[in-house]
Amino acid sequence: MFKKLELEWKIFILAFVLFVAIALPLQRLFVSRLTSTLEQSIDHDLEPLLRSGLTHMEGAERDSIVACLERHRQWKALIPIIINEQRRSIFGFSVALLLGLSFFAFWTLKRLTRPLKNLAGTVEQIGKGMYADVVPASGGALGTVEHAVVTLQEELGILREKARIQGMERAWQDIARVMAHEIKNPLTPIRLSLDRIEERVAEGENLAPETINKFLTRINNQLDVLERLVNQFRSFSREPEVHLKKVALHDAISSVSGDLAQKITTDLQGTATIDADPYLLNQILLNIWKNSLEAGAKKIIAHIHTQGPKIRLSIRDNGPGVKNEDRERIWLPYVSLKKGGTGLGLPVVKRLIETMGGTVSIESDTTENNQHLTVNIDFPQDVFGETQYE
């Protein structure tokens, strides 16, 4: 616990311990010396001597000896009282001195450590990438550190800008490389089909309608792949325009799931009216349903319910799920865990959901008997101040 305390409290506690360790022995020493001195002022042979003189004295001399004997007894009785009084006085003075010194020490330490605290907060801001206004105003070693922090912030800003530019360059290089690769894949069968048609025509062969339809179907399928790739890239690269309306979430899901009902069944539970862009919502749902279908899922359970201040749509499929080490990677563009995937489906989903003010997360299990992937989408309830749900 002592290690977690701030610097001034550590110094204050150490100083308090040292003060108590020194003050108490000094107090005992002073009382001991005072007691010894007072006891030495008493002559223990005086009282017997005076008593023996009383038998031979009369009159004024006897009265004088009696008075002397009385003063001697009073002094002996006062010594313990004086010692106790001095002990209390020393203790009170020690406490007052301790409180005064403690207040002064704490105030001084606060003033001494405040620049260090400010400097620590400044360095923390710089570490988080924020700009911190550092004005070197101290002298000595602390001033040197403040100047070093100013230089550090300037150099770090330059390095961050270089890293940002280099990162953008690498990102666009990766995008260009992936796009070139993905575009080349469908172009190859298109080229082969056209070459095949050209060869048969050159040989004077009459192509049957079913043969032409076979080649056209192959070419159209690959053109669909190209169109899908371009549309996904366009959706990811540009900022979508959002036109929020009241949308029945149940109806939107039914529309998408109905189009794919022959390939994957959907069990829809709950209903809600949310504020969303119908076109963007359709893109989101279509991407998720196609992603489940391409992963090999046969069934989806979609559950609409409230989750705190938001409406949550949980979409759970019975696909193979995603491993723990891949859960963050699936949101990165052009990172695909499926063979032949573009890696833009889920990043587009995340981007569109966040554009409408929502959030998205996943839960997954890859164990043999409980494989599933759940996509949780949270929509805000009150964009327009009135949202109905069940």
Image (cartoon, rainbow, N blue to C red):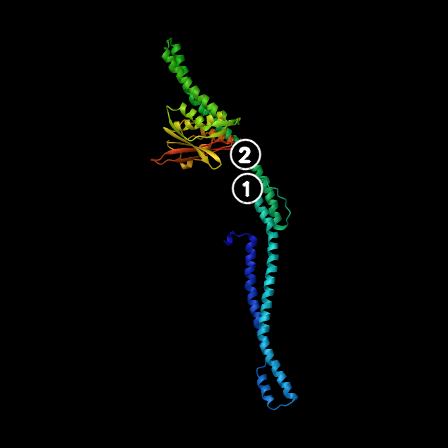
Q: Which mark is first along the chain, 2 or 1?
A: 1
Marks 1 and 2 in Cβ contact (< 8 Å):
no
Which residue is at the front of the view, 382 or 68? 382
Residue wearing tag 1:
127
- Mark identifier at residue 41: none
| Label 2 packing within 10 angstroms: few (<14), some (14-19), many (20+) | few
Q: Is residue 192 visible?
A: no
- Residue furthest right as drawn: 60
Q: Residue at x 56, y 69 (%)?
A: 28
- Residue furthest left as drawn: 369
Horizontally, residue 212 falls left or right of residue 274, namely left
Q: Residue 270 lies in what quarter of the image?
A: top left
Callout 1, which amino acid? Gly
- Give the vertical position of 52 relative to 116 (above or below): below
Q: Position of residue 362 (x, y in %)?
A: 43, 34
Callout 2, which amino acid? Arg
Q: Residue 77 lies in what quarter of the image?
A: bottom right
Which residue is at the front of the view, 286 or 257? 257
- Give the vertical position of 260 relative to 195 (above or below): below
Q: Position of residue 278 (x, y in %)?
A: 49, 25
- Dividing the image into 4 quarters, which one contains the C terminus? top left
Q: Position of residue 366 (x, y in %)?
A: 37, 35
Residue wearing tag 2:
164
Q: Is residue 306 visible?
A: yes
Alpha carbon of mark 1 to alpha carbon of mark 2: how far? 16 Å
User: Which numbered disc, 1 or 2, marks the residue closer to the eye?
Assistant: 1
Horizontally, residue 145 falls left or right of residue 277, namely right
Q: Position of residue 325 (x, y in %)?
A: 42, 37
| Label 1 packing within 10 angstroms: few (<14), some (14-19), many (20+) | few
Secondary-structure class at tag 2? helix
- Give the vertical position of 202 relative to 328 (above or below): above
